Amino acid sequence: MRITALTTGTLQLKPTFLEGSPAHGGPLGLIWKLSRDPDFTRPLPMWAWILESDDERILVDAGRAESRSGVTRTRFTISPEQTLVALLAERGLCPDDFDRVVMTHLHGDHVGGLPAFSPERVDPGREDFTTINTPKVVGGITEACGEVAATWYEGAIKTVHSVSSAEAAEMAKLLENTFRMINIGLVNELAIMCERLGVDVWEVIDAAATKPFGFMKFTPGPGLGGHCIPIDPLYLSWKMKSFNYNARFIELASEINTNMPRYVVSRVMEALNDRSKALKGSKILVLGAAYKADIDDVRESPALDVIGLLKKKGAIVEYHDPYIPHIHHETDGWQMDSVGDVMKAVKGADAVVIITNHKVYDYKAIVEASEFVFDTRNATREFAKEIKKVVRL
């Protein structure tokens, strides 16, 4: 098996021999070129190779392995070196072969590779920061690897920030995700505390956000979603257990965030009880299935958990999402289609639960047509603060 190419998604990049590379007697190896394309907005992978043997091609990127000859798909984390070592070990190669395969620069039968790690930085739905103008952190397994990777990314990215190792690059990514996870957990717990104290959590957060220093605004919600923030910090926590260390902040924030869908359902149930209705048998319309506003990504979305919990409580649940026509829950086995007429569904529901605050919704019209709205995103803040049939998280 040998490394034969570097890819980004479906884009095949060809090796270019530059002055100073081993082809010219220099130390740096292959430089992979990517033209600066103003339309190039797809996230670059953290790192990617294609490994080939006589019977299969394996794409390795962003800590995932996918065999082109089968359906194998595996995710690894913590160390880019561990990722490739584990992948090669599955195919009978020992760690010593790792160095031989990926560190050999155009010697013998192996095409040289210079492994480095560059974490993904992408905020789906955002247009002001794209792949091109978001600074790119990169670290190589060796100094030369880092230099080559930085040179490659500089062909497409405006700002490249090099660190001393691949591990430092990945730890930076874990810090970014853990920072958001813990702070969202903090404001989610604040929302729970404020509800018991009879204080408006949204007013409190807006007031604190007027401080021009020493504070960063985070907002509560029905739970975490996406493929990074709810998951990646837990890999770090898991890894630290092998060092006999308990990552307490991560575990506590995960516990709070994971329980937010259950908290939302309990609040809906209490609000219906205040209106002399039981949750069981009530018609509930969930607005939004995506994990964040104005995107079509349902990965780890709290909407799935909220819907599942409502169904288990005996509610008759429908959902609407303009970007996601169909959802299914892999564990519980249920599936649903988005309702066609959202306003008709609003009028027929005993309760409307706003999970994702898509901008396309006319929230004023929804509130006016509904019997009761539970707003987990403060989407109705402009007009519904004093309307009794609207309850906010």
Image (cartoon, rainbow, N blue to C red):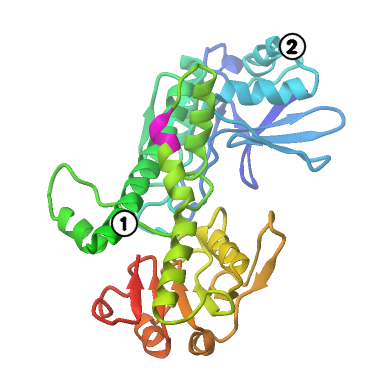
- The N terminus is located in which quarter? top right
Q: SS at mark 1?
A: helix
What's under tag 2, amino acid-wise?
A: Gly
Quick check: 102 above or below 378? above
Residue 191 is tagged as 1
Q: Is residue 121 visible?
A: no
For the residue carrying disc 2, how many other residues have a C-alpha within 10 Å: few (<14), some (14-19), or many (20+)?
few
- What range is drawn magenta here? 247-251
Residue at label 2?
108
Q: Residue at left 35%, top 82%?
A: 389
Q: SS at mark 2?
A: loop
Left-right relation of 116 to 90: left
Q: Residue at left 29%, top 54%?
A: 193
Q: Quadrant of residue 368?
A: bottom left
Examine the residues drawn in magenta and state their main secondary structure.
helix
Quick check: 172 above or below 339? above
